[in-house]
Image (cartoon, rainbow, N blue to C red):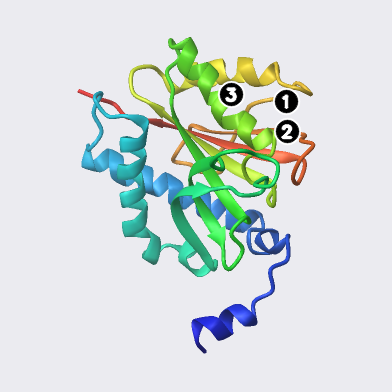
Amino acid sequence: MSLHQLAAHSPLPSDDLSKILVPSGIKILLELIRDAYFELVQMRKIDLSMTENQITEEWYVCLQFIWPQSAAYHLKLAPIHQKEDESDRKSRRGSPPTIDFCFRAQWNRQAYFGAECKLIEANDKTLCDRYIENGVNRYIDGRYGQKFSKGAMLGYVRQTKCSDVAAEIRNRINRLAGSPQLVQTDKLLPFEDHYISKHSRLKGLSPFTVHHLLFLFELA
């Protein structure tokens, strides 16, 4: 069957990603994200001079290498680096918001499981605030992922402890509407720094769950 014929036989329901990504599917994607991080740590390619975008690019290279051998490869999703979200293109001026990467549903550009990446340190108020304001809040207000009820935040930690970073994130999340909670989980062991928070939102599927993964790069 040609690509054109395949597209013609593929419906585009708004809930198509939910049908693919049941909880077990989400876990597969999170494990892939985790494994790409482990690969990057082993390669020791990150240093203090690197920007957020440079770290994300290296991480994404690792993901691309392990993607074909992962269980996620069979979920009919496409990994995309720098994904524009056009959900509100009629009501917004300028370029659409761009999420750092996502796993997109087949033939539905706006149905995706996204991840926004941020540098963050426990002793840097600006970075901690930006993690919420330019990351978590973009899910909550519907700028990212309106057609799906889950997404991820990747926090790049290089100089402080992940537990201290989590405490700073928790304090800020508690102050958001509805006083959501940041809860540590054990779903991705041996990776320990995985947290979730659940939020109500007015635009897009609700409630919305954010998976927070704090990636520590121990630099010599």
Q: In this view, does 140 lie to the left or right of 97?
A: right
What is the spatial separation of the Cα atoms under label 2 and label 3, in whole angstroms?
14 Å
SS for dot 1: loop
**Element marked by disc 2:** strand
Q: Could you say which is closer to the camera, residue 10 or residue 188? A: 10
* CA distance for labels 1 and 3: 15 Å
User: What's under tag 2, amino acid-wise?
Assistant: His
Please tell me which residue lies in front, 79 or 6: 6
Residue contact at pointers 1 and 3, CB within 8 angstroms: no
- Say if 91 sits above or below 79 in the image: above
Residue type pointed to by label 3 = Glu
Q: Which of 137 and 122 is in front in this view?
A: 137
Q: Identify the image quadrant of residue 55.
A: top left
Q: Which of marks 1 and 3 is in front?
A: 3
Q: Could you classify mark 1 by the number of other residues whose Cα lies within 10 Å: few (under 14), some (14-19), or many (20 or more)?
A: some
Residue at which label 2 appears? 199
Left or right: 173 with respect to 70?
A: right
